[in-house]
Image (spheres, rainbow, N blue to C red):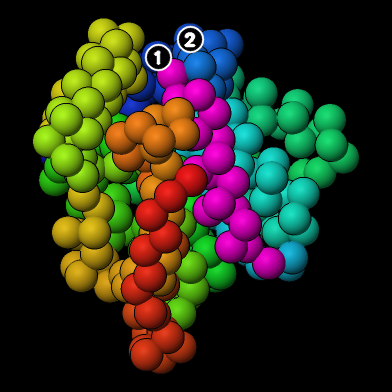
């Protein structure tokens, strides 16, 4: 047991260090790789937040979305394993005169005294093997108040025509292999998080997809969901808005 904990801690430290090293190029490479769609997908997620809401960003990285949320007047808490990513986020917040609670640690260990109005897991769940991804989804959804919002901007499962699906698979796999070589993600098939929503007690409210350039294959998507509970019953009307 003690050995297992020690090995988990050391793999957290290693992953944190790998992301520390990626801090200087991470945002630029994701902007170039996605032609700005990664940022756009996070912007859609953040647009669901209201001023005064308490929101938690898991695996926030350098937090362009957390800064957007602070600018909207949300009370922001962020967790990440990478100290350097959080330092960059702190500078970004200071530059716009905002502040947030920044926690350097493992999101699995986060046990707040009060549940959040919203939790955002943007480009985060994708860095786990499937079992851990499902465990993290359940844990993260449990941090949201019943009826509260769960936001996911991430890569999209392949959809559409055969060429569009092939393009999605090859394009996203090449990105994953590059990140794997840098020690940032494990290799795995792309996830459809919706499959794990029932066990996390999440109900889809809205989905927005993002294409490669203007009319190309779908590569990214933003999911807005609600945690089931008294307030959420009958509230969720699944709607798909297929373009951006
Ligand atoms: C792929 S990056 C995404 C960063 C950011 N959310 C974005 O949209 O650009 C994943 C982030 O999760 C962090 N991370 C990985 N495992 C974590 C864990 N168990 N707990 C907290 N943060 C973690 C990494 O340090 C990294 O900054």
Left or right side of 25 for 208: left
Whether the residue carrying mark 1 lies under 8 Å from ligand 1 is answered with yes
The magenta stretch spans residue 236: no
- The residue pinned by badge 2 equals 21
Q: Which mark is residue 18?
A: 1
Q: Nearer the viewer, residue 136 or 125?
A: 125
Q: Which mark is residue 9?
A: none
Q: The residue tagged with tag 1: helix, strand or loop?
A: helix
**Picture quarter with the N terminus:** top left
Residue 244 to residue 201: above or below = above
Rendered image quadrant of residue 137: bottom left
Rendered image quadrant of residue 173: top left
Question: Does residue 226 show up?
Answer: yes
Residue 196 to residue 125: above or below = below
Residue 125 to residue 185: above or below = below
Q: Position of residue 48 (x, y in %)?
A: 59, 62
The residue that appears at 21% across and 44% down in the rendered structure is 160
Magenta part of the chain? 33-50
- State the count of labels: 2
Whether the residue carrying mark 2 lies under 8 Å from ligand 1 is answered with no
């Amino acid at each position: 047991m003690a050995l297992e904990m020690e090995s988990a801690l050391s793999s957290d430290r290693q992953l944190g260090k790998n992301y520390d090293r990626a801090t200087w190029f991470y945002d630029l490479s994701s902007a170039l790789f996605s032609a700005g769609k990664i940022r756009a997908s996070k912007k859609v997620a953040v647009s669901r937040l209201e001023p005064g809401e308490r929101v938690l960003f898991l695996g926030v990285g350098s937090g362009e979305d957390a800064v957007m949320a602070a600018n909207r007047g949300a009370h922001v808490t962020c967790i990440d394993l990478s100290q350097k990513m959080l330092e960059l986020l702190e500078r970004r917040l200071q530059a716009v005169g905002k502040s947030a609670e920044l926690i350097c640690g493992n999101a699995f260990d986060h046990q707040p005294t009060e549940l959040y109005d919203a939790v955002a897991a943007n480009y985060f769940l994708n860095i786990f093997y499937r079992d851990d991804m499902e465990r993290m989804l359940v844990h993260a959804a449990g941090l949201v108040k019943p009826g509260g919002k769960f936001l996911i901007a991430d890569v999209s499962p392949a959809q559409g025509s055969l060429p569009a699906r092939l393009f999605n698979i090859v394009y996203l796999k090449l990105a994953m292999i590059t990140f794997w070589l840098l020690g940032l993600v494990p290799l795995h098939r792309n996830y459809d998080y919706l499959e794990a929503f029932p066990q996390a007690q999440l109900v889809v409210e809205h989905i927005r997809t993002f294409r490669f350039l203007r009319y190309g294959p779908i590569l990214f998507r933003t999911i807005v969901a609600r945690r089931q509970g008294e307030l959420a019953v009958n509230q969720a009307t699944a709607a798909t808005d297929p373009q951006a």
